[in-house]
Amino acid sequence: MRALDEGETFVITSNSQPVGELRPLRKPKFGRKEDLIAALRGVASVDFAQFRADIDEFVDQGIDPRG
């Protein structure tokens, strides 16, 4: 398992024939913060009061389950 943790891949055989592969899972890759900020530059800002009003118009957010 240590070798697997270090990135080594193993071929699984049956009767000397390869039947599978055991390899480490790929670690998720995250974008750089700077790239995200650059991509979002120039995007329209959100008017949160208007957004909330739009949501309230279509979604009942009351706590009474019988509505």
Image (spheres, rainbow, N blue to C red):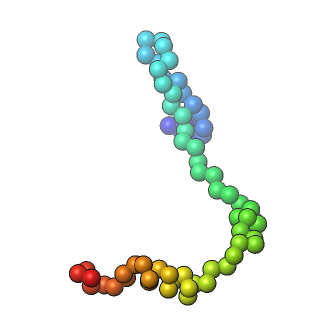
* Residue nearest the viewer, comparing 39 with 52: 52
Please say if 60 is above or below 31. below
Where residue 58 appears, x then y in whole percent?
A: 42, 78
Residue that appears at 43% across and 11% down: 15
Q: Residue furthest top?
A: 15
Q: Is residue 53 toward the left or the right of residue 60 in the image?
A: right
Q: Tell me if 13 is positioned left or right of 34 in this view.
A: left
- Can you tell which quarter of the image residue 47 is in? bottom right
Taking the spot 75% from the left edge, 72% from the top edge, the residue there is 42
- Residue 52 placed where, x, y %? 50, 84
Say left or right for 58 vs 62: right
Q: Is residue 26 above or below residue 15?
A: below
Q: Nearer the viewer, residue 20 or 54?
A: 54
Identify which residue is drawn at 63% across, 80% down. 46
x, y (%) of residue 34?
A: 75, 65
Q: Quadrant of the C terminus?
A: bottom left
Residue 67 vertical placement versus 26 (above, below): below
